[in-house]
Amino acid sequence: MIEIRGLCKRYGEFVAIPDLSLRVESGEIFGFLGPNGAGKTTTIRILMGILTPSAGQALVDGLDCQKDSVEVKRRVGYLPDTPTFYDYLRGREIVEFVAEMHGLSQGQEKVAAILGDLGLADAANEYAVNYSLGMKKKLALACALVHDPPVLILDEPTNGLDPRAAREIVERLKERAARGLTVFLSTHLLEMADRVCTRVGILHQGRLIALGPPAELRHQLAQGGSLEQVFLDLTASQEETAS
Amino acid sequence: MRQFWALLKLAWRRELNTWVQQTGRGLKRQGTAPKRGLGCLGGGLFVWVHFCIWFIFLRAAQGFAQYAPGELVFLLALLQLAGLLLESASQNLAQLDWDVEWLVTLPISRRALLFLRVLQRALTGQSVRTMLWPAALALAWQQGWGWGALPLGLLAAFPISLMQASLGLGLEFWLRLRWNPVQIRNLHALIGLAGSCCWLLAMLPGLGQSNPNMLVFNWANWAHLSRWQWTPFALWNLTLEGEGTAWLGLWLQALLVLGLTLSGVAYLTRDGVVGNGSREAGRIEPVGAAGGRRWGPIIWRELLLLRRDRSFMVQTLVMPLLMAGLQWLVHPGALTQVLSSPENLCATAFGVSAYALLSSIYQAVLSEGQAFWILFTLPRPLSRILLEKARFWGLVAGGYALLILLGGAIYKGMWNDPMLWLLAVIVLVGVVIHSVVALCLGVFASASFMANQSSKMLRIEYVYLFMSLCGFYTYSLYAADLWSRCVLMLLSALFALALWQKMVEGLPYLLDPVDQPVASISLADGLIAVQAFFVIQGIMLGFLLAFQVEAALAVSLAYFGAGLVTALGMRFTMWRRKISPPRWWGAGWGRALLMGAGAGLVGVIYVKLLRAASCLPEDSRYPETMFFLMVLGAPIFEEFLFRGLVFTSLRRLWPERRAVLGSALIFAMVHPALSVPPVFLLGVVTAECYRRTGRLGPSVLAHAVYNSLILFAS
């Protein structure tokens, strides 16, 4: 369960997120939609304790993401938008490192299984800096999943993946969500959000301008049109009111 | 032509941005107040060190006149070789990405692009700025050109820098296109090492005592370098002597090198410009994983990287020994001096391990690079992870110290000197303390780099701060007695603790480009205030005594004055940083009275016992004028400093009980050695009063009661 209360983030004069409140229940796949620069990644980084909020707080399972960050990280698997890895470490070694830091005793078998599951078995002994973006994403996903976290926070999980890999990942996420895993993912791919998410929130200039199941939003706002239409309408009307 | 300017502007802008970021003006992240204080100190040191480099060059140049031509040519050759190698080592050879792959996609001919790159490096290269220009200026100044040395020196340096940049470019293309990344990375380490050696050898005559029998000059004579008048190094010197043909020769050579390099690179890139951008996977090593469980994942990872990354290995393991080794070239008699006393041997051991700490744990955060995010996803506090790294590298550095100590002890047979063993303990404690210091300062130095990523530069001033702190600690090896040694060590440890507190509080904000930790009283504030209190008191006392004020009155006045200045200064700082100051009035007076009286009784008994054992001289009585100081001044100011600031800050760092004992220990430490036990007790009692009530008033009362009892008893 993820809860965001009155979250605000300023970068000097620039207000990235003015005031954001949001609640994601367990077992949900929540899609965080928005155009580039809407504040999706900032929100996610605050959830992971990489950035600090200027005001408000973010909670995972009732634990504060800043004050109880260690406990939060025990429960969360995180995938950044563009993962970068250490030089001179092989893919397998990186996942093993993460597993050991999570205190897993049966680390090696687990790592081998998860790498095989994500189709990285052949590349496991390659240095991770040599990976393509898609492979890096999968490796980061392996790091995120290796300790079986109840909550997944994914920043643009299918960005840079080929259609087959993207579909595989989406299927995996659905599977895990069916088992009660909470997924919080950001994306600007509306089609994917439509297909995967149980609920979406559309973020624009740091404000939540729509929230609800994709079907409902479509129905209410675009009279049966696509989610893309909803998104374009909403962000366009916001631009107008802003200007 | 327009494209040409656009690219040149890009290069200049990159350079400019780096400088603006370095000075902090363009940075979004404005340091917090105490950081700024440290920054100022570091900035001063930065200027000082640069002044030293220039001074070394000038000294070397003064010596130039007396050198044989061959020796001078040799020095200049070394300098230029160092420039070439270090410039290549500082290029992005070690990185997989190669910006040329992007630049060639721009609509500009390849030849023009290459020429521009040479020009850019010739004008903006780091080695050009820090080596060629100062050397050329010093040389021209020495030849008697006066202020004309400035344009003339720069003009003479230009063809040389053009040559250096051309060769550097050729090297870069050749390596990138023909070698694989692992080879390049290893070679990169070697190039850096060779460059540093050349640089230090070239600087030798300017450092230390200039000695005609120096190793470098022997090499010069051996190679008969005086005959090599046609080489650029010799021509460079001749141009500055004002010979027209030398100018011509130098420029011809520069153009020739440029032309040859450009043609060579054109040949190399005839099939396109794509670097060999992937690292070899190498063979599968099942050992690594098993090691992980034995050592813990962090140390296992460090060991793995150390084994695979030669550059990292050279930097962390070889450089400290190399640096120490080169000192013997500078000062030929250094070895005998080092072995002449246990103090010198221990200072050397500590110096080498301090350097090892600087080249390893100081880079703890930086070496994580862009993969730092992984540490943010792990269920362990970041400070613990970094501390584990510090522990590992502290062990390595301690190993160096032990090796040197054992080597020296065996060689000189100092085995049975107890002093050596005492000092060895001080050295090892110092390594532990300074691995924490290096870790913290390294985090501060790389903070803005980590948050902005765009900034190329690190805050170099923290390196100088680290070195100064190590210097301060080295003094404890030479201190007169055990007590002052202990005090110095304890001070260093306290400073490390203060830095640690700052670092732990700053860590969650490390990747945040804007936000800063909420301001609160830190141990650093407390220590600075205590120090300011004593320094101001000393200065005031000096003045008052100089004006013939009676001694006891002068002491009281200085005490009150220093207390007021410090307290008001701290209140002002707190007001500016929006920190709520400690409060004074509240409940709990009765208990404070009792506790103060209890501690006072113990103090009186202690004084009586000392008298009985005639440890205290009979005339150690307090004059009546001291009454106000002891019953009013001391309680108020000392409680504000030690309970209001020091204890409050320790409380955020430690559990309550440890904070009480810690603040009492610091409080006792600033008193004379004989009075430590009862003062420590008083510190515990008053801190306890403050802890229970949250008000300074009761602890002031307890302190006043204690002091009055001691006063009446004596």
Image (tube, coloured by chain):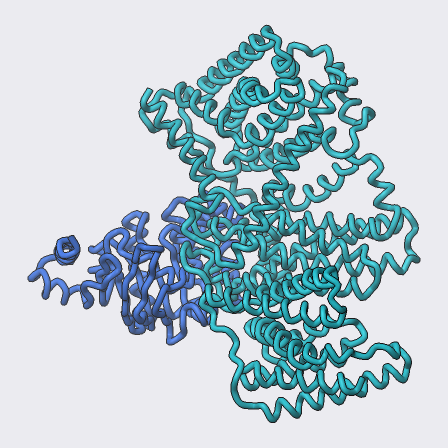
Q: Which chain is blue?
A: A
Q: Determine the residue located farthest toward the front in the rendered image.
A: B548
In the rendered image, the vertical position of residue B239 relative to residue B17, given as above or below: above
Q: Is residue B306 left or right of residue A78?
A: right
Q: Determine the residue located farthest toward the left in the rendered image.
A: A223
Q: Which chain is cyan?
A: B
In the rendered image, the vertical position of residue B212 relative to residue B636, given as above or below: above
Q: Nearer the viewer, residue B432 or B298?
A: B432
The residue lying at 26 percent from left, 55 percent from top is A38
Location of residue B408 in the rendering, given as x and y in whole percent from the top left corner: 85, 48
The residue lying at 48 percent from left, 63 percent from top is B378
Location of residue B66 in the rendering, given as x and y in whole percent from the top left corner: 76, 19
Quarter occupied by the C terminus of chain B: bottom right
Location of residue A5 in the rendering, given as x and y in whole percent from the top left corner: 31, 71
In the rendered image, the vertical position of residue B225 relative to residue B96, given as above or below: above
The residue lying at 80 percent from left, 66 percent from top is B483
Q: Nearer the viewer, residue A16 or B303?
A: A16
The residue lying at 54 percent from left, 61 percent from top is B503
Quarter occupied by the N terminus of chain B: top left
Q: Is residue B205 left or right of residue A159?
A: right
Residue B232 in sight from this viewpoint: no
Location of residue A65 in the rendering, given as x and y in whole percent from the top left corner: 41, 69
Residue A31 in sight from this viewpoint: yes
Counting labels gives 0
Q: Nearer the viewer, residue B590 or B157?
A: B590
The quarter of the picture where residue B691 lies is bottom right
